[in-house]
Amino acid sequence: MIPDHLTILIVIIPLLGAYTTLLAGWVKRRFCFPIAMVTICIQFCISLALLYQVMKTGPLHYNLGNWLPPWGIEYVIDPLNGFVLVVLLFLSLLCCMYSKRSIVAEIEEKKIVGFYTVFLLLVAGVCGIAVTGDLFNLYVFLEISSLAAYALVASGREKKALFASFNYLIMGSVSACFILIGIGHLYIATGTLNMADLARLLPPLYGSPLIQSAFIFFIVGLSIKTALFPLHLWLPDAYSYAPSAVSALIATVMSKMGVYALIRILFTVFTPAFIIMEIPIMELFCWIAAIAIIVGSVLAITQTDLKMMLAYSSISQMGYILLGIGIANSVAMTGGILHILNHAVMKGCLFMVAGAIIYATGLRTIDDLKGISRTMPLTAAAFFIAAASMIGIPPTVGFMSKWFIALGALESGQWFFVVIILASSLLTAIYFWRVFEYMYFREPDMARQAAVAGANDPPASMLVPILILAAACILCGIFVAVPLEVIEPSVTRLLGGN
Amino acid sequence: MIWEFNFALFLFLILCAIAAITVRNLLSAVVILSVYSLIMAVLWAEMNAVDVSFTEAAVGAGITTLLFIATLSRTTRRSED
Amino acid sequence: MKTWALVSVLLVGFLLIWAEGDIPAIGDSDAPAYNYVADRYIKEAYNETDTPNMVTAILADYRSYDTLGELTVIFTAGVAVLLLLRRGGRL
Amino acid sequence: MKQDVVIRTVCRLIVPFIQIFALYVIIHGASGTGGGFQGGVIFASAIILIGIAFGLPDALQRISEKTNTLLSCTGLYIYAGIGILCIIFGGNFLGYSFIPLPLDSAATRGLMAEIVEIGIGITVMAVMTSIFYDIAVKEDM
Amino acid sequence: MEVTSFVPALAVAIPAIASILILVFRHHECIREGWTVIASFATLATVLSLLPSVLSGNEPGFTLLEILPGLSISFRADAFALIFALTSSSLWVMNSFYSIGYMRAHKEHGLTRYFFCFAVAISAALGIAFSADLLTMFIFYEILTLSTYPLVVHAETEDARRAGRKYIAYLLTAGIFFLFSVLVTYFLTRGTAFLPGGILTGHGSEALLTLLFITFLIGFAKAAWMPLHSWLPTAMIAPTPVSALLHAVAVVKAGVFGIARVAFYIFGIDLLSVLRLGLLLGIIASFTIIVASMMALTQDNLKKRLAYSTISQLSYILLGIALLTPSGIIAALIHIPFHAFMKITLFFAAGSVIIMTGIENISEMKGIGRQMPLTMLMFAIGAIGICGLPPVCGIITKWYLALGAIEAHQMLFLLVIISSSILNVLYFMPIIYTAFFEKPAEDRGIREAPLFMLVPLCITGIGSVLLFFFPDWPFMSLVKIAVGVITGEVIP
Amino acid sequence: MIETFFQSLFLRYNYYMAVIIMLIGLYAMIAKSNLIKKIIGLNIFQTAIFLFYISSSEVTGGTAPILMSDPGTVYVNPLPHVLILTAIVVAVSTTAVALALIIRIYETYGTIEEDELLVQEEKT
C-alpha cells in the first residue's frame, strides 16, 4: 500500500513533522532536532525509492483526492523531479545535521523550536514544488517555502539579516505576484491549471500575446527567485547575513528549487517548440545569463567578506545553470541540470565551511582567515576541494558540468558563450585562490592570532556534512556517469516535445 | 452587473490606492487601505464572487488592518514619503 | 530608485496591456476558462460532493490539497512571526 | 482605554455573538457563503477585540499561547489526518469517498469537507490570534 | 598492439596512495619520509615492469570509465609514454633522497605538505605520461598545476607568494586554453583518444585547426616557450628539490610531452605539415632558444641562470617536434630524458652549494670547486652535457637535431642550433671557471654536502655520462619504437 | 480602428482597471522608501491581481456559484474564486511576516525608512 503513496508522502511527512516539531518543542526543546532529522531522513529514503521507481517504470502519476487530473490536483514524478528531489533532500539532510551545533551560537536558544519547524516547512514547500503537476499548487508551495526562507534568514542574531530578509521578502513577493499573473493568463487562455494539460492545449495559442506575456511573467518571476543578474539585488545580503546553516540551505535548496520550477515551466508547460520557435527571448535569456556569469564573478572578486563572496559567486554559478538551460540543446541541458547537483554540493560545502570558521573563530572577513589551515586542517581541505570544483578543475564535478555546457554552446554554434564560460573559470579562480592563499600560506595577523590559534575543526555534527560534501565534489566528478544516467532520460523527456 | 456602478467603484479604488501610497500619515494610509479593501469586497460581491468578497472583507479590511495598526503602535506613524 | 521604479512599472504595464487585448471579453460565456474544467465543477459539484456551494466543494474537495497548502502557508506565517517576535513564553 | 466602560461593556456583549456567528459561518460554508477560513478569521477577530478592549492579558486568559499552538497544530492534524485516513482505507490522499461510512460517496465527501472546514477554522483562528499577540505585545510581556 | 593491463594505472596510483600515507603519518618524520622513498622505488619498479612488454611492441592499457562515447578516462603505456614515465620515476627516487637531505639540512617547515604535494605531483606526471586521451591528460595536467603550487610557495614569504600567484595565474590560464582545445577537439571529432597519425584530419576548416593548434600551444604553457615563460624563473624561489621537480622531473617536461603528444597523436605529422604548423612551432622554438640563452647570460643568480637555460633547452624539444622529420622527432623525444638527467644534476649541485655555503650568486662562487670538488665536478658534467660536448649525453640530441634540420631542409634552424650551442658554452663556462680557477676569498671551512644529497647527485651525473655511452638502454630503444609508430617508418 | 479599440477597451475595462491598480502597487513597492508603504503597495498589488482573476470568472447573467433550485441558472466560474481565496490567505500571511520584520527592524535601527537604513548599514 505504502509504495503507491510515496509520491504524496514525501510532502506530507515533513508537513506532519513540522506540526509535531512545534508541539514537541513546547514539551522539550531538545526533541526538535531529532524529529527534524528523522523526518528528513525518511524523506531522503523516499526520494531514493521514488527515483528508483521512476527509472524502472517511467513517470509516476498521483491524483490527489482521486480526482482525475484537470479537475483535481496531480502529482507527477519523472526522472527530472526524481533527480532534483534526491539532490534537494540530500542537501537538506546535511544542512539539518549541520545546523544542530552551528545554530547554537547564532540563534537564541528559545528560538530553536521555531527554527526547526520553519526548516521542515521549507523542505516541505520545496518538495511540494518539485513533485507537483499543477501550476497553482506550485504557487502555493512556492509561498510556503518563501515565507519559511524569509523567517529563517532573519532568525539569527545578525542585525543586518533583518533588512536583508525584508528585501528578500519584497523581491520574493514581486516574483510570486508575477508568477500569479502568469498563471492567471494561462488559465484564462486555456481554462486549466494542470501542466500536462496546458502543454496539450497551448500549441494552437502560441501566437497569442496572452500566452507570450505569461511566458515573460514566468521567466521574470522565476529569475527573481533564482537571482538572475539584474534581479539579484536581494541575494547577497540574504545569503551572507543569515545563520550559516540557513545560508547553506537557501543557497542550495531554495535556489535550486527556483531553477527547477523554471525548467519545468519552460520545457513542460511551454514546450521546446514554443521556446525555440516562437519567442526570441531565449537568445536574450542566454545573453543575460552570460552577463550574470561574468558580473557575479567580478563582484565576488571585490568582496572582503567570505560569505558575501560566496553569495556573489552563487549569482555567477546560477548563470551557468540558466545558460545551459537557455541554450536548450540536449548537451547544454545535461550540463545545466548536472550543474544543479554540482552547485548544490559545492556551494553547500563552501557555506558550511564559512559557517564552521565563524563558529570556531568568530571571524568572517577573508583577511581574517590567514593561517586558518593549521588549526582547522580538515575544514580548509574541504574548502579547497569545493573551491577547485567551483573553478572547474578536473576531476571534480564542477569540471564536468562546465564541459557539458560549453560543449552544448559549441554545438549550437555560440562560440562566444564558450569564451564566457572559460573566462569565468579564470575569474572564479582569482577569488578563490586569494582565500586559499590566505588560508594556507600566511601567518595570522597579530590581532587575530589568538582567535586563529584557539580554533579547532568544528564538532563532528558540523564536520561530517562538510566532509561528505567535499567528497561528493570529487566522487560525483569521477562517477559522473551515475547522475548522467538519470539526467539523460530527463533531458530527452524535456526536449522530447519536438 | 451594472457597469456604471462598477465604473464608479473602480474610480474609487484607484483613488484609494493612490491615496494610500501618498498620504504621509501611515495610520491614514492604513485606514485608506482598509477602505480600499472594502470597496474591493463590494466590487467582488457585485461580480458574484460572494465567498471571496466575504473573505476580503474579513481579512483585507479586518485582520490586515488590525495587524497594520498594531505594527504602527509599536513603530511609528510618520512616513517620509 | 524612483526612475527605475517608473521604468519597470511602465515595462510591466506595457506587457500587461499588450496581453490584455487578447483576453476574452468580460462575461463571455464562450471563454475557454468557463467551458473546460469549470464546466464540470458547475454541473457535477453537487452530485459528486453533496455540497451546494461550489466554491466550498472545490476548496474542500476537488482542490482540497491546495487548501491544505494554504493552511500550511498561514501556519508558516504564524511560526515565522513567532520566530521573529516572541520574547516571552516558552517558544 | 481601560477606563472606557462603554467599550468594555459593548465588547462583553457582542463577543459571544461574534463567536457564534463565526461558528455559523464555518458550518454554513457548505451550503452558503462562508467556510472555515472566514469563520476562523471572524473568531480570531472576536478574541482580538477582547485584546483591544480589555488589554492583552485578558485575551491571553481566554486563549493562552499554549492553547494557540496546540490548536493551530490540531487543525492541521485534522486536515492531514483525514487525508491519511483516506490512504489507510485504500484511496489516494484526501480521497474522501474511500472512508467507509454508511453513506453514499457524495455524502461522505460532503461530510468530510465539513470536518476539514472545521480544521481550517481552528487553525486559522489560532494562528491569526497568535500573530496578533506577537505583533501587538511589547517585549516586556 | 593493445593489451589490457592495469599496470600503468598502478604506477599512477602508487604515488597517490603514498601521498595519503604521508598525510596519515604526518607526526612521525621517519615513517613519513620512509613512505616517500618506498613509494618512489615501487613506482620505478612498476614502470620498469612495463618495459619488456613495451619494448616488444605492446601497448598495455585500459579504460577506467567512459563518461560519454569518445570521452573517457583511460591509460595506455606506449613507448612514447614510457620515455617520460621512466624519466620521472627514476629521477623521483634520486629526488626523494636529495629532498630528505636538503630539507633536513635547511631545517625547513611544513615537510608533510611538501612530501604530500611532491608525491601528488609525481602521480600527476605519470598520469600525464600514461594518459591515452586528451581528457585524462587534462585532468592530470591540472592536478599537476595545483599540486606544485604549494611547493612553489613553500617558503611562505611575500616573494614566494607573489611567485606562486604568477605561477598559478599562468598555468591556470593555460589550463583554460587547454580545456578549450580539448572541447573543440571533442566537438570536431567526437573523440579525444591519442592515435598515431592524429584524429583531426578531415575535420574543421584550416583556420580553425590553426587556431586550435595555437590554443593547444598556449595550453601547454608549462613548456615555457617564450613569451609564456616568465613563471619559470620566478618560481626559482622554491627550494631546490622543487626546482628540480619543475625543471627536470615533471612540470616543464609535462608541457613539452603534451605538445609532442598533441602534435603527433591529435594532429599528426601530415596535417601539421599541410597546415605549415611545424614552421610556426619552429619559429617560436628558435626564438625561445636564442633569446632565453641570451637572457641566461645576464643572470648572476645561479638558479635563475639554470632556469633560463631550461627554457632554452625545452625549445630544443619543441624544435625537434617542429622539424617533423624522423631525426628531428628522435632528437625531441630523446632530449626529454637526457635534459632531465643533466638538468637535475645541475640543480642538485646548485642546491648543495646553497645549502653548504648559502651562496646563490655566481660571482660569489670563487674557488668553490676546490672546497666541494665532487659537487662541482658533477656540475661540470651537467654543464658540458647541456653545451653539447662529449662525453655527456647532450650531444646525441644536438646531433639528431642537426640531422633533422638537414632532412627538413631548414638550414635556418641548423644555424639556430649551432649558435645556441655557442651561447650555452658562453653562459656555463664562466661558472666552471669561477668555481675551479679563481681563488676563494677566505677559507670558510666548506665541505661536501651530506651523503643524502651527494649520492643522488653523483648518480645522476654519472648517469648522464653513461647515457652517452649506452643511449640504447633503454631510452633510445623506446624512442625508436615511438618514432616508428609516429612516422610509420621503421627506424634502424 | 479607433472604434474597435474602444470597443475592446470597453469589453475588458475590468482588466485594464486591474492593471492600473497593479501598477500603482508595484510602483509603491519599488519606489517608496517607507517599509510600511512598501507593504501597503504589496497589498494593493496583490488585491489587484485578485481583481484580475475574479474578473475572469464573470459570466453575463450569471449568479453566485451556490446551487439554486432552478436548473436553468447560469453560474459564474467558481474556480478563480477558489484560487483567490487561497491567494488572499497567502497575501495576509506575507503581510504578517513583513510586519513582524518591520517591527524588528524598527527595534534594531529606530527607523523604517529605507534610505536611513541604508545609511546606517553603511556605517557599521
Image (cartoon, helix red, strand yellow):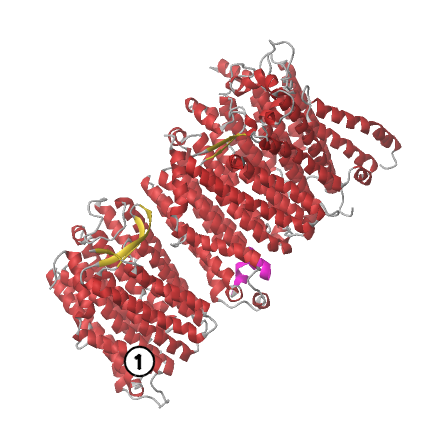
- Residue B35 in sight: no
Q: In which quarter of the image is the C terminus of chain E?
A: bottom left
Q: Is residue D118 above or below residue A471?
A: above
For residue A267, what is the image quadrant? top left
Q: In which quarter of the image is the N terminus of chain E?
A: bottom left
Chain letter of disc 1? E
The spot of residue D88 in percent (x, y) is 59, 33
Q: In this view, does D123 lie above or below A246?
A: above
Is residue A367 found inside the magenta-colored segment of the image? Answer: yes
Relative side of A175 to A471, left or right: right
| Amino acid identity at mark 1 | Val
The spot of residue A133 in percent (x, y) is 50, 31
Q: Which residue is drawn at 49% across and 67% down?
A: A442
The spot of residue A378 in percent (x, y) is 50, 62
Q: Residue beneath label 1, please?
A: E455
- Residue C11 in sight: yes
Q: In this view, does D45 lie above or below C84?
A: above
The spot of residue A83 in percent (x, y) is 46, 41
Relative side of A483 to B64, left or right: left
Of residue A346 and residue A173, the one placed in the foreground of this image is A346
Instruction: Give, as a single range, the part of the protein colored magenta.
Output: A355-370
Q: What element carries label 1?
A: helix
Q: How crowded is mark 1: few (under 14 residues within 10 Å), some or many (20 or more)?
A: some
For residue E440, what is the image quadrant? bottom left
Q: Is residue D108 above or below residue E80?
A: above
Relative side of E296 to E109, left or right: left
For residue F56, what is the image quadrant? top right
Q: Which residue is drawn at 67% across and 39% down?
A: C78
